[in-house]
Image (cartoon, grey):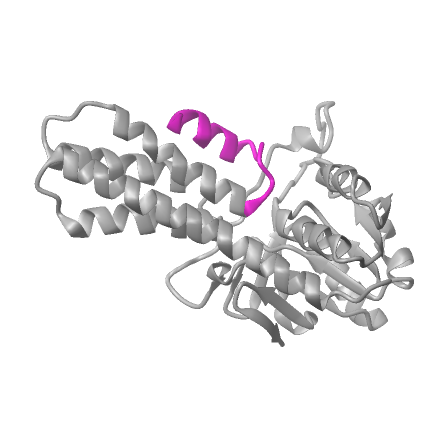
Amino acid sequence: MIDETVEEIQEMQTHSSSVVAVNATRALEELLEREFATAEEYVRALEQNGSMLRQANPSHASLQTAIRNVVDDVVEADPDTVADAKSLTQEKIDAVVSRVESAKALAAEHAAAFLEDGATLLTHDYSSTVLEALEQATEAGKRFEVYVTEARPRYIGRKTARSLAELEGVETTLVTDSANGIYLEECDRVVVGMDCIVDDVLYNRVGTFPIAATAAQLGVPVTVLGSASKIVSEGFVFENEFRSGSEVMLEPAEGFDVLNPAYDATPVSLLESVVTDEGRIEF
């Protein structure tokens, strides 16, 4: 389960950062089924496997925080027996998962209340928090028109468009990434998720920065949704991920390089606000 989860994270099979954090944390439960001679041996295995999961995506703030919370708490408790160590691990896993899931739900609830009925929105990439916010808002009777960018080269936006199309009250249109400037002129707001905010920079799926910059030029406010745990002020250095060029083009690149960064950096000065489980903050 741990090896499979590491592979899933590396291949970005799951696009929601909160779901990645939950899946990675739950993967540690595999250790509860293994046999260990001593508590020390178990704790070493927990640290090693926690490190493997974290290294699967060093730039993923929610993942890093979730795994560290479990591992650090068990290590600091210094359990006397394997049974005690396993029991504490399960307790910490359950607590972390509950905290991540409740934070996402509460952030979505705050966003659903904030989004105006009848608004035309543009979103980018795939965010389970954005989807849940729109689902809650439409259940409350609100209606929206939503433009969704494709989020190339992996076309993650198509998954978002399909999910939104299932919501009654959302008129969904999929557009190419480079066409965002055309349709932003019709929008009341840009709503995106976030990988993390570190100091004064939002890190999110590549393509977020040009959308935010264009929106600022056109006077369209940009709101970011996510749990407060994704806002990091210290102790975390974002590391971008450069994925295979084969995601961009299948044929060999002869005489030129293909660069495929997974994330970009958007100054928070281009954002109007962030909505988290703790409420809404204006920049």
Count the labels in the image.
0
Q: Position of residue 183 (x, y in %)?
A: 89, 56
Instruction: Judge whether residue 56 can be spotted in this image.
Output: no
User: Residue at point 33% right, 32% down?
Assistant: 29
User: Residue at point 48% right, 55% down?
Assistant: 238
Question: Does the segment drawn in magenta span residue 8?
Answer: yes
Quadrant housing residue 168: top right
Instruction: Judge whether residue 163 can be spotted in this image.
Output: yes
* Image: 60 above or below 46: below
* Image: 283 above or below 251: below
From the viewer's perspective, is 213 left or right of 97? right
Question: Does the segment drawn in magenta span residue 13?
Answer: yes
User: Residue at point 61% right, 66% down?
Assistant: 275
Judging depth in this view, the residue of 138 and 125 nearest the camera is: 138
From the viewer's perspective, is 143 left or right of 42? right
Q: Position of residue 55 (x, y in %)?
A: 40, 40
- Quarter of the figure that contains the N terminus: top left
| Part of the protein shown in magenta | 1-17
Q: Position of residue 20 (x, y in %)?
A: 50, 41
Residue at the far front: name it: 140
Quadrant housing residue 200: bottom right
